[in-house]
Amino acid sequence: MTRKLTRRHVLAASAAVSAGSFVTPVRGAPPEAQKITPALIEAARKEGKLAWYTSVDLPVAEKIAKAFEAAYPGISVKVERSGAERIFQRIGQEYQSKIYNCDVVNSSDAAHLIVWKRADMLAPFVPEDVARYFPAAHKDPDGMYASWRITLSPIAYNTKLVKPEDAPKGFIDLLDPKWVGKIVKAHPGYSGTIMTATQQLSRDLGWEYFEKLAKQKVMQVQSAADPPKKLALGERAVMADGTEYVVTTLKARGEPIEEVYAVEGTPLVTGPSAIMSRAANPNAARLFTAWSMSAPAQQMNIDVGALRSAHPQVKDRADRRKLADIKTLREDAAAVADQADAIKTRYTQLFKV
């Protein structure tokens, strides 16, 4: 059986990772910023395709892929969508078997990019927009990856089942006996968003919070995209976690769902993208990455996918609160890289799933 590539295996032989979202030791000057040039487009068209591994919800991923294909006819995008933790294991197993299917990878667990970087599995590439506009907190100092998307993991409730005045205001409110058997949440063993959120909440509220939450007869699902959908169907009244962009999308369609930005702070989750070092289609990968980080593509992420962006030239949606006005918890991808295996084990013990 193929040995799984865990964070522990990769990080064991490397120095301890410094605290902070994208903080890793700088190896030297990052590569120069790259523009989309006629030469790059021609080289990408000769390859004619690329494989994009992503954990973003499939309908969003497919829209992004089709937009790129429309912008650059003759280059097809094969979308391989799964939970971030499953993508991490898949790529690890493929590389161990010397199978290099993935050209561009996007994960909702920023710690994955730290692990892949330390294993020399990423290729340096800095799109012009990333170099010019992205804040330092949203790009790797060595030019290996940058935040393709940002989202939050809020609480939410079904407005047909819960009155606004009765809705939870924060995470501790979910421990009220009135929510027994009425909560749905996703799993950190499948979802990078939930792995990141679990690390933040266990750090700030303690594992005692999860010990108590596990006694609330919680419906357990896999993806962070699933809890909002369960709410919309009326299968549960409240979600303890999930991804904001699906809540926003469902709400815009008229579904009975309302987000709650917790009084304790809402977990903030970045979703970096990178090019794999052994990409079979490196030019198509560079073109896709440069395009995806541009202001028009990032604006489409917001308008079509209800994601958030680190690009300062884009405008947020008018139908939701601005990110600057939301109290958020601090993301620490380096800590997740160190603690992920322990988090999965502790979580499974508590929730028995």
Image (cartoon, grey):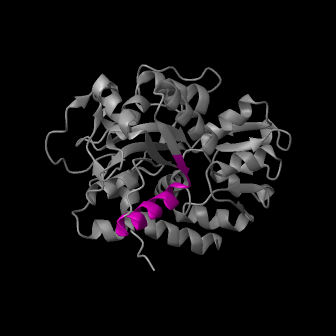
Is 84 within the magenta?
yes
Is 192 within the magenta?
no
Image location (x, y in percent) of residue 300: 54, 26
Image location (x, y in percent) of residue 6: 39, 68
Would residue 125 appear left or right of 107 to someone viewing this image? Answer: left
Residue drawn where x is 53% and y is 30% of the image:
301
Front one among 187 and 276: 276
Front one among 78 and 344: 78
Residue drawn where x is 61% and y is 67% of the image:
211
Residue drawn where x is 33% and y is 26% of the image:
129
Name the quadrant of the N terminus.
bottom left
- Residue 286 in sight in this render: yes
Front one among 124 and 280: 280
Q: Is the magenta stretch mostly helix, strand or loop?
A: helix
Give the magenta-colored segment's residue range. Answer: 79-98
Residue 260 position (above or below residue 12): above
Residue 344 position (above or below residue 53): below
Front one among 131 and 248: 131
Question: In this figure, what is the number of numbered marks?
Answer: 0
- Residue 306 in sight in this render: no
Image location (x, y in percent) of residue 265: 54, 42
Would residue 258 appear left or right of 42 to someone viewing this image? Answer: right
